[in-house]
Image: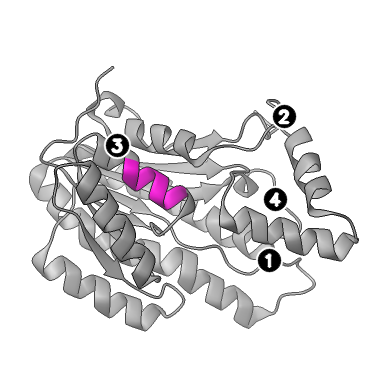
Amino acid sequence: MNISFEGKKALVGGASGGIGLAIARQLAKSGAEITLVARNREKLKRYTHELACDHNQQHRYLEVDYTNFESYKQIIRNYFKDHSVDILVNNTQGPAAGGAMEKNIDDYQQAFDLLFKTTVCTTELAVEHMIEKKWGRIINVASVSVKEPLSYLVLSNSIRAAVVTWAKSLAIDVGQYGITVNSILTGFFDTERLGQLNRKKAEKMGVPEHEVTRAMEELTALKRIGNPIEYGYLAAFLASDQAAFITGTSIPIDGGYLKSL
């Protein structure tokens, strides 16, 4: 199966590393022109240059702070005054770890701004062009915790569930325009974020980090942590013409972690 995004433009959030960068690389490899979005300017510059060297397209970057919604809103609005995208990947850094008894209402509001409001704001701006072209792909990076909550990630559990149900509603509204909306339920992947979480958990439990990682691997059917490259393959497929009849779904990519149907 040959996937081509020649002539397509994509905006990929959280693209200075991990899953976001893996998605950006795969879309670029298939011919898309990418705008990488993240908060680390040096990494954005480096990876934009890397993509330009590896693939013969014009790529760009957008420096944002997802934790400051008012600033983010202004920057993303300005971007869409002069640009449009065919493929939107909604992805940000995760909120702080912690359980339900550790978080207060302000923590939930901050997580809502970070995960939900940025996603809705960006999508509202991107979808106008997609409707005009009668073609578009919206992909939300969510989590397996939407189906099986992780006790130490209560903020992510709660707000990502809202994103997934919102995405289902949006899929119904925009399907008539040839736009698909899908969410990916992310399992355990070898990223900086997972390393930070495992180090914190290891410190709390008083055990070596590798024991936490090994226990996590044992929770999956494949007995391993995922490679971000594998995530990029799924995102590229969902963005392709070959996936035109797939919308309103929440697709796990978790190595068999989820036990529910």
Q: Are marks 4 and 3 in contact (CB under 8 Å)?
A: no
Quarter of the image that includes the N terminus: top left
Q: Earlier in the sequence, mark 2 or mark 4?
A: 4
Closer mark to the observer between disc 4 and disc 3: 3
Q: CA distance from mark 1 to mark 3?
A: 30 Å
Give the main secondary structure of the magenta stretch.
helix
- Type of the residue with mark 1: Ala
Spot occupied by residue 216 in the image (x, y as percentages of width and height): 75, 42
- Type of the residue with mark 2: Lys
Q: Which residues are magenta?
A: 19-25
Q: Earlier in the sequence, mark 1 or mark 3?
A: 1
Toward which corner of the image does residue 154 lie, by quadrant?
A: bottom right
Q: Are marks 1 and 3 in contact (CB under 8 Å)?
A: no
Q: Residue at x 68, y 66 (%)?
A: 97
Q: Considering the numbered disc 4 on the image, is that residue within a helix, a strand or a loop?
A: loop
Q: CA distance from mark 4 to mark 3?
A: 27 Å
Please name the residue that numbered disc 4 is placed on. 149
Closer mark to the observer between disc 2 and disc 4: 2
Q: Can you tell which mark lies on residue 97?
A: 1
Q: Can you tell which mark lies on residue 223?
A: 2
Please name the residue that numbered disc 3 is placed on. 239
Horizontal side of 255 relative to 9 (left or right) equals right
Q: Residue at x 42, y 33 (%)?
A: 234
Q: Are marks 2 and 4 in contact (CB under 8 Å)?
A: no
Q: Earlier in the sequence, mark 3 or mark 2?
A: 2
Spot occupied by residue 146 in the image (x, y as percentages of width and height): 60, 48
Q: Residue at x 76, y 66 (%)?
A: 99
Spot occupied by residue 179 in the image (x, y as percentages of width and height): 24, 41
